[in-house]
Amino acid sequence: PTSQAIFQNAAMEYGNGADKYDAKKGVSHDDKGVKDDYPGLLPYQQTVMLRQLFGVRYETKSLATESSRAKALIDLRDYATVGKNRPVLLEIDQGNFNHAVTYEMQKNDRVYFRDPYGQIRSMPSDAFIKHVVAVHKPQEMVG
């Protein structure tokens, strides 16, 4: 839908600093010219955007090893994505870029997530351990 495209554009523009993203062409512009194949927001840029959007401090954990990914999977098992809790974002390695999705839950050895277009999707826990390279998690809220 149009509203999602508008929001994604706004989030990209806020998070990417001086770069100017062109959603139609999938490129960005900076003071040096056009950059093709824009990879999206880097993990630190997503952290900046999430803090501003949700009004709480987010922590980004890069997951460089399968053991760190397995630990992150265990840590997320009991995270409730309802109520006052803010969303947790996962970055899935897609080869040349990462794809950010919103964590939903774990059930029957599957990890459920919402993609940017609003669709609920899932992957086996083994795929999480192989492909999720970062987790953006809100910090505890007081009161």
Image: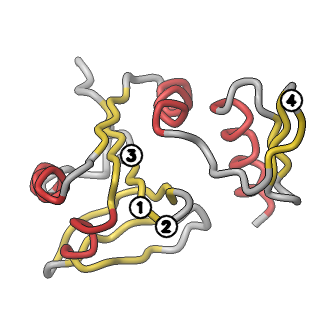
Q: Amino acid at mark 2?
A: Gln
Q: Amino acid at mark 4?
A: Lys
142 lies above or below 135: above
Say whether disc 2 or disc 3 marks the residue closer to the N-terminus.
3
Q: List the single residue furthest toward the front.
A: 32
Distance of label 3 from label 1 (alpha carbons): 16 Å
Secondary structure type for disc 1: strand
Quadrant in which the C terminus appears: top left
Circles 3, 1 touching at the beta carbon (< 8 Å)? no
65 lies above or below 136: below
Viewer-side residue, 19 vs 84: 19
The residue labelled by disc 2 is: 94
Count of numbered labels shown in the rendering: 4
The residue labelled by disc 4 is: 32
Question: Which residue sits at x=40%, y=23%?
Answer: 56
The residue labelled by disc 3 is: 87
Say whether disc 3 or disc 1 marks the residue closer to the N-terminus.
3
Say whether disc 4 or disc 3 marks the residue closer to the N-terminus.
4
Circle nearer the viewer, 2 or 3: 2
Say whether disc 1 or disc 4 marks the residue closer to the N-terminus.
4
Colour theme: secondary structure
The residue labelled by disc 1 is: 92
Q: Position of residue 82 (x, y in %)?
A: 31, 51
Left or right: residue 15 compared with residue 28: left
Distance of label 4 from label 3 (alpha carbons): 35 Å
Secondary structure type for disc 3: loop
Distance of label 2 from label 3 (alpha carbons): 21 Å
Distance of label 2 from label 4 (alpha carbons): 27 Å
Secondary structure type for disc 2: loop
